[in-house]
Image (tube, helix red, strand yellow):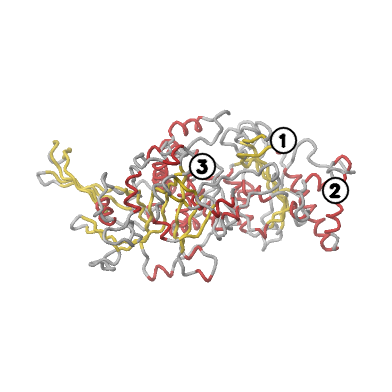
Amino acid sequence: NSQLYRRRGHKMKGDVFVPGKYLYKQIQGGGPQEKFVEFDFKFYNTTQFAGLENNLPNCYCNALLQVLYFTQPFCNELLRSTPDPNVEFCIRDELSFLVHMLRQARGDQPCQAQNLMRALMQSEDALNVGVLSSTMDTQICRSTREIEADVNKEQSLFRRIQTLFRFLCEHLHKEELELKRLKSSADYKTLAKKVFGFTNSVINKCTRGHVTVKDSLYFQTSLQLPKDLDESLKFVDLLQSSLMSENNIRAWCESCNTYVPMNQKRIVSSLPTVLAVNCNVKNLQQLKYFGSSERGSSSSPWLKSCFCLKTDEAKGHILAKAAGEEGVDDKEWATYDLVAMISMVIDERGKNDCIDPSTQTDSITDMDAHFVTHVKVHPVYSSSKAETKQWKWLLFNDFCVTPTDERDVMQMYGHKKVPCMLFFAKRASGQAKDSVSLKSLPDLSKDGFHDLCYEKPLTYGRQLKSTFTSLDPRTESPGSNGCMKVVGIDCEFVALSKTEKQLHPDGSETILKAARLVLARVSVVRGEGPLKNVCFIDDYVRAVEPVYDYLTRYSGLREGDLDVGRSKHHLTTLKKTYMKLRYLVDQGCHFVGHGLKNDFKMINITVPPDQIIDTVELFRLAHQRKISLRFLAAYMLKKDIQGVTHDSIEDAQIALELYDVYCDLKKAGTLKQKLQEMYKWGRENKWELEKLETNS
C-alpha cells in the first residue's frame, strides 16, 4: 500500500523501527478495480533525480549503478565518450547510454538498466564470476548462457555487489586497453584506473636482505574488522591497518634460490580519486562498530564521514587520521569525504525477518534482503540555480528516491541495515572545483548517422524487397535545425518471458509480473517534405536471447525474422538501432506515434516530453478511456488497419495522418466537439469497429 510506504515504517521484533523509505516496494499491476490505472512513480519520488525500476532480473545492480552515475568524474567521462556502433556488446558504451538516460530523465520517469544487463549476459567473464542470475523463466527453454548464469551465481547477496563492482572496474579497464590496442597498462590511465584505481605494493624482504617489490592495480580495499568487538578501535586506525599490513611468511626467494623466511609488507602506495571500501562485515554482531559512537564522544559516530590519508614511499607506510586531527597538513595530506554508501536492508519478504545477530552475512540471499544507496549528490547534478553550491544526501531505493541527511546515513536501525560498500571522494583543490561540469557529447555525427542508415544489414544478399528509403544526406536533415522536424515512429516487441497473473474469484486478473519485452522492430517515417509518409528506417533487431513468444498477432513478427541465418528482413544489432534513434532525439526531432511512452521505456531511451506527440493523448478526453490506433484510424480516417497482424510502417504512417487531422481540428476549433462525438458513438456501439464504414 502506497500510503503505508509514506506514513509508516516497519516495526521489527525487539522494537527496531525501520522507516518506510527503506522498505522494499515492488511494481505491480492494479487490482480488478484499477486495471486502467498506471503505477504512480511520482508518489515515491518527488525529487528531480530518476530512480531505477526493480521489475527486471539482476535489479540488485541498481544500487551500484546509482553510485557510478553520481561519481562525478566517472559520469563525466562516460557522457563525453563516443560509442562504437560496430562493437555490439561493450559495457562502457552501455554504461554511457545509461548515465545519459539518467541525466535526461525526470524524477517521475524511472529508468531501466535492461540493455546493460543484456550486454553483461553476453560476457563470459560476468558469467564466470557469478554476478548474474538467469533472466528467463525456469519453466521455458533457456540458452546455455542462462543455465550457466544460474550455476555460477554468487549466492551471497552481500558478496555479489562487491564482486560486481570489482568486475565492472576490471572489465572496463581491460576493455579500454583492448580498444586502444595497448598490451601494457603501466603508463596509460583508463577510466576505471583514473577514478577508482590505486597501486598496491607487495614488498618481500628475506632474512639475507634481498628485497622484491611487485605492484598490482586494485579498485577496492576491504576493512579487516576484528572478530571481537574492541571499543577502543577507531575507524581511521582500522582503515590504516587495512591499507597496510605486515606479516612473516616462508616463501621462495629468487636471489637465494630456495624457500626462506620473509617479511612481507602490503601497502597502498598511490591514492585513488575515489576510494571504494568493502565493509567486510562477517556477521551481524560486527554491526556494533558501525552503529556505535566513538569512545569518549557519544555524539561522534564511529564511522567517519571525513578523514585524511598520506603515503610515505620512503618509509613504506600509509597514515590515516580524522579530519581536523593534530598533525594533519593540507599540503601533504589528501582529504576524503564520504559520498556514497551501499547498504543491505533485511526486509519482511524472507525467513530472516527477525534474523539472529550471530547469522553470517554470507547466508543472506535475494529473498531476505535488498540494497539501498545513500548518495551525497554533487551540486553539478542539480538543475536548480538556487542549489548549485549545495551538496545534499539522497536515499535511492530502486525507483523510490527520498531526501535525507548524514545522520540517517550513519543509522543502522538495529541489525536491519548492513553497510556493504563505502565510497570516499578525494577533496578537490579550489581550481579543480571551479572546473567541474557535466557535459554530454553526441554519440553520432551527421555523417556517422547517415553511414549507419546506409550500412548493409546482417542479412545482406538474402533480404527481400527493401521496405524503406534512407534519408538523402544532401537534402534531408532531421531535427529542429533541419528540413524534417517531425517523424512518425512505431515499435514492435517480442516476449522473453511469460506474464505472471493472479486470478480473482470474479474471473478478473491482476498482473503480478509483466512479461519481459525486448525491441524487435522499429520503423521511422518521414513526417515532412516531398517524401512525407515514406519510411527511412525499418530495422529488425537481432535476437541474442531465446524468444518465448513472438506475439505475432500484435507484432507481425514470426519465428526466424530475428535470426541471422533465416531472416529475410533488414536485420541489424540493437546497438546500431539505438544509436540511430538517439541521434534523432539529440537533433530535436518530434516523434509522432501511438503509445510512445511505453515504447521508449522498453527501448531504454529518454525522450524529452516536448518531443513526444502521442496520438493516445491527442484523441483522449480527460479521465476517459484510451482509444486504440485501429479504432482511431477507422473513425477519423475511415481506414481499416491491423486486420490480421500489425505492421509498424503502416502504424507509423497512420499516426502521422491522425496528427494532421488533429492539427486541422485544433485550428478549426472543433477538436473537443469531435472527441465528444467519438466517445458518444463508442459508448453507444460498445466500441465495435464492425459498425463503422471504412475503406479496407
Measured as percent of width and height from the top left, residue 196 is found at 37, 53
Q: CA distance from mark 3 to mark 1?
A: 43 Å
Q: Residue 506 got which mark? A: 1
Mark earlier in primary sequence (1, 2):
1
Q: Residues within 10 Å of mark 2 (few under 14, many from 20)?
A: some
- Callout 2 secondary element: helix
Is residue 276 or residue 592 the one in the foreground? 276
> Mark 2 highlights which residue?
635
Measured as percent of width and height from the top left, residue 460 is found at 63, 37
> Mark 3 highlights which residue?
119
Is residue 625 visible in this depiction of the protein?
yes
Question: Relative to residue 446, is residue 145 drawn left or right?
Answer: left
Q: CA distance from mark 2 to mark 3?
A: 43 Å
Is residue 96 visible in this depiction of the protein?
no
| Numbered marks: total | 3
Residue 174 sits in quarter = top left
Tag 2–tag 3 contact (CB < 8 Å) = no
Residue kind at label 3, given as amino acid type = Ala
Look at discs 3 and 1 and give the one toward the viewer. Answer: 1
